[in-house]
């Protein structure tokens, strides 16, 4: 039980602490990256897509993300009405995805690959992800470049980048939200459900991001960040993420074992900030708070009624060396877990 | 001994650990290739249209997840001819394979079994294996685990390779021709890496094949196609393996396998229960390997006799009558008798049927040799032109995968035929690779990516090494002549296995999954 997390965390965290910062004061955060972190990150960047490199465990987790999304969609697929074919619309590939903190594009690219190459993805055979388009955000320009360069290695993905069904945006979420509310429209926007929903997304993904957001007074807290993420989700849509729990087993693994001197430890001391890890209960509370804040209007405050239509899922995953990641029921507090929240319609 | 220890170690080396390097050389060309217009892009390109390559294609076409992939297959032979192959009920091709139940269920799953002419396929329910030196014996059947009211379970099903290939081809044809290209009568003249187009995709790590129809004018430009995943199902000298710069090691056994299509005398007494068929294999340690007689419909059988190169040449030079006498002798006479008969002078001129010296020798010697009860019926005829031989070899590629390349079947491994597992391993590879590709499509993975392919290699490498190694050990064990300690130990082992039903049951269950 210890070994899995030990094997996982070094690579996930090493990559993420430095790169997927989605924190707080948007402009200062991106410019305040220290030279130390930059050089550490550059050495990692070249190996981002190396299947045997430091990001290997992250690559191995990617199929589980698809499995988890599929299980969420099986529970409830966001309904996007196509005027001509309203009856079987839920079966088609109409979903718009937003991947926040896409890094080198491991998940975003794999999701883009599931978008049909036909002229109208919405009307082709239903895929597992039901994806019609995806926008991927990351504040690091270096990582966005790596992601774009890698996408060119696959003609299908490259084709989606050209048609605009797949977009990489070098931006933080806080910078990106205002651009949506202005005049920009999506090029293949066949899926406008309502006026409001047109700018929003059916599925927003947040993989290995939330645990890297500083929880300091005076800046944007993880809770505030989650509220922003939730504001991007259409009613009936999903916010799906994965993170690491802050519990005694994960403290042993991350602080005591993983950062022990060589050869026991595999990460330099100080790589992990265990105190930033998030427990499922805290996350659920933040999400509920975020949903209620989202319902706050000018004149009235949103109450618990917004929570009635919501749905919460949480599943622990464990890395078994040689076998890969497996969903293990009840292991949410051991370390890595997936979580999802569906906004009420 | 070095090669043996290397094989023995291989299962313990994690295949993914062997992938740590990118091939230094990625180029295969019989002559220089031309840089023409951009190649057409395919998801899966399979080189080789044997049972493994066609099996992969049929499996991909059969699954709803992978049926939309754009696939191509390149074969030097005429696939149209293979499609229209036909023989009458009394004639059988000499290239016959024994399909394990798991191979059969794979073929059923992909819908190919319905296209097979099952009247030409023969399941058998019992296997008699014995040591010609010591006489100890093991019989494989399911009788101890099957109640009297059930049908006996099948050990394996004998099928002509041509019948299987035809079935796979018509299964593929039944899937329609959308997203499918069959390059029949075509050779791969070169495989190179593609190029990076400035305002298009970067194909510099994609294999690009130049395909030339056989007999076409040299001036005609070859067809160029790019492969997301290039599958080498192209046999022991695999050009795909050479392109990927994957090393292969192994050895030649200095043995040849003699095959022939035979007809048998009526069984006496008639088999019980009715329809029960038996395969026979007798190890002949002094002659270089086992002789096996495997049943085909209508009292026909196929022969696989592994023996030294000299013996093989001698046997092939015999008249049909003398050849039949030798086959019958090999299941009945002692090692000394057989060695004598393999050195008999062959008559320079044709002799009358009554006076064939081998036949006379057999008749005379049989009178002085007590016979056990488990020998096969007498072989009475050999189909004209069906006696052939092939060299026996062991090969195992260092890895099955490389970026955008996967090897299946003989391109990945060649093993001793004594357990009849070669084709089954190939079909096992193909079933695993098809499943891997399906998983990749389902999870948004690139089907040619190493992260995808290592799933396939991890699934198959140890299994194939284990079975290839087991066949190799059996071959070596049964090549120690005389009655020394090795012969004593192997007989003890065989007798023990035969008498302890639990062990035997385990072995047979293992064999089913082979």
Image (tube, helix red, strand yellow):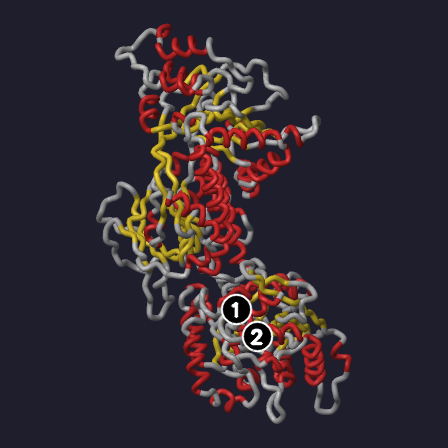
Which residue extends farthest front? B485
CA distance for labels 2 and 1: 9 Å
Q: Work out whether A163 lies above or below B469.
A: below
Pointers 2 and 1 in contact (C-beta within 8 Å): yes
Name the chain under label 2. A
Tell me, for residue B499, which label it has, or none: none
Task: Identify the residue at image location x=42%, y=82%.
Answer: A39
Name the chain under label 1. A
Residue A231, by quadrant, is bottom right
Q: Secondary structure at mark 1?
A: helix
Task: Identify the residue at image location x=62%, y=83%.
Answer: A222
Residue nearer the viewer, A317 or B178? A317
Which residue was labeled with disc 1? A58
For the question of whether residue A221 can be seen, the reply is yes
Task: Identify the residue at image location x=64%, y=35%.
Answer: B502
- Residue A324 on image: x %, y %: 56, 61
């Amino acid at each position: 039980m210890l070994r899995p997390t030990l094997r996982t965390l070094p690579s996930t965290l090493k990559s993420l602490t430095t790169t997927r910062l989605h924190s707080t004061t948007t402009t200062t955060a991106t410019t305040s990256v220290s030279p130390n972190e930059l050089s550490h990150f550059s050495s990692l960047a070249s190996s981002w897509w190396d299947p045997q490199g430091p990001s290997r465990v992250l690559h191995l987790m990617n199929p589980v993300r698809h499995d988890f999304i599929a299980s969420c969609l099986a529970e409830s697929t966001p309904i996007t009405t196509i005027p001509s074919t309203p009856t079987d619309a839920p079966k088609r590939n109409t979903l718009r995805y937003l991947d926040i903190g896409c890094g080198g594009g491991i998940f975003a690219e794999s999701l883009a690959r599931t978008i049909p190459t036909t002229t109208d993805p919405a009307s082709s055979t239903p895929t597992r992800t039901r994806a019609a388009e995806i926008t991927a955000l990351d504040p690091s320009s270096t990582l966005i470049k790596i992601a774009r360069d890698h996408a060119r290695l696959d003609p299908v993905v490259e084709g989606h980048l050209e048609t605009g069904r797949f977009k990489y945006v070098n931006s933080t979420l806080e910078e990106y939200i205002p651009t949506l509310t202005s005049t920009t429209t999506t090029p293949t926007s066949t899926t406008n459900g309502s006026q409001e929903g047109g700018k929003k997304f059916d599925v927003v993904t947040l993989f290995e991001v939330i645990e890297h957001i500083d929880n300091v007074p005076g800046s944007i807290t993880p809770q505030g960040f989650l509220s922003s993420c939730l504001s991007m989700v259409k009613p009936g849509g999903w916010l799906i993420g994965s993170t690491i729990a802050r519990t005694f087993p994960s403290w042993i693994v991350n602080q005591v074992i993983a950062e022990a001197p060589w050869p026991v430890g595999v990460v330099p001391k100080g790589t992990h900030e265990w105190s930033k890890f998030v427990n499922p209960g805290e996350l659920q509370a933040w999400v509920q708070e975020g949903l209620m804040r989202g319902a706050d209007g000018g004149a009235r405050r949103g109450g618990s009624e917004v929570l009635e239509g919501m749905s919460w899922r949480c599943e622990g995953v464990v890395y078994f060396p040689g076998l890969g990641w497996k969903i293990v029921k009840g292991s949410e507090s051991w370390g890595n877990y997936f979580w999802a929240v569906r906004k009420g319609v | 001994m070095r090669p043996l220890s290397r094989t023995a170690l291989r299962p313990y080396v994690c295949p993914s650990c062997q992938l740590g390097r990118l091939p230094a050389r990625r180029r295969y060309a019989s002559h220089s290739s031309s840089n023409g217009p951009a190649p057409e892009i395919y998801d899966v390109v399979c080189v080789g249209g044997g049972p493994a390559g066609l099996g992969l294609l049929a499996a991909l076409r059969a699954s709803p997840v992978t049926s939309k992939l754009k696939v191509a297959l390149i074969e030097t032979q005429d696939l149209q001819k293979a499609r229209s192959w036909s023989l009458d009920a009394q004639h059988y091709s000499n290239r016959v394979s024994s399909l394990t139940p798991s191979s059969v269920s794979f073929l059923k799953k992909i819908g190919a079994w319905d296209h097979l002419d099952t009247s030409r396929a023969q399941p058998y329910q019992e296997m008699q294996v014995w040591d010609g030196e010591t006489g100890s014996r093991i019989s494989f059947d399911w009788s101890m685990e099957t109640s009297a009211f059930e049908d006996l379970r099948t050990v394996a099903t004998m099928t002509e390779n041509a019948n299987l290939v035809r079935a796979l081809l018509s299964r593929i044809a039944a899937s329609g021709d959308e997203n499918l290209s069959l390059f029949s009568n075509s050779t791969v003249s070169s495989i190179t890496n593609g190029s990076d187009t400035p305002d298009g995709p970067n194909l510099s790590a994609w294999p690009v094949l130049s395909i030339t129809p056989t007999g076409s004018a040299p001036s005609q430009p070859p067809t160029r196609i790019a492969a997301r995943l290039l599958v080498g199902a192209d046999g022991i000298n695999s050009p795909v393996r050479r392109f990927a710069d994957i090393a292969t090691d192994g050895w030649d056994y200095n043995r040849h396998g003699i095959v022939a299509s035979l007809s048998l005398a009526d069984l006496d007494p008639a088999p019980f229960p009715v329809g029960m068929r038996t395969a026979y294999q007798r190890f002949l340690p002094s002659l270089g390997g086992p002789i096996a007689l495997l049943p085909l419909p209508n009292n026909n059988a196929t022969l696989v006799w592994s023996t030294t190169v000299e013996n093989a040449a001698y046997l092939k030079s015999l008249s049909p009558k003398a050849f039949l006498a030798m086959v019958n002798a090999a299941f009945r006479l002692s090692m000394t008798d057989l060695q004598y008969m393999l050195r008999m002078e062959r008559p320079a001129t044709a002799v009358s049927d009554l006076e064939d010296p081998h036949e006379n020798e057999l008749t005379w010697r049989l009178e002085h040799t007590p016979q056990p009860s488990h020998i096969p019926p007498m072989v009475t005829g050999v189909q004209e032109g069906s006696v052939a031989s092939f060299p026996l070899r062991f090969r195992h590629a260092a890895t099955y995968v490389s970026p955008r390349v996967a090897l299946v079947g003989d391109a990945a491994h060649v093993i001793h035929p004594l357990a009849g597992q070669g084709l089954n391993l190939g079909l096992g590879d193909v079933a695993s690779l098809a499943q891997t590709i399906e998983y990749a499509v389902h999870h948004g993975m690139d089907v040619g990516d190493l992260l995808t392919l290592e799933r396939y290699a991890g699934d198959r490498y140890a299994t194939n090494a284990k079975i290839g190694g087991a066949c190799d050990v059996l071959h070596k064990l049964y090549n120690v002549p005389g009655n020394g300690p090795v012969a004593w130990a192997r007989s003890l082992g065989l007798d023990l296995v035969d008498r302890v039903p639990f062990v035997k049951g385990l072995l047979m269950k293992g064999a089913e999954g082979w």
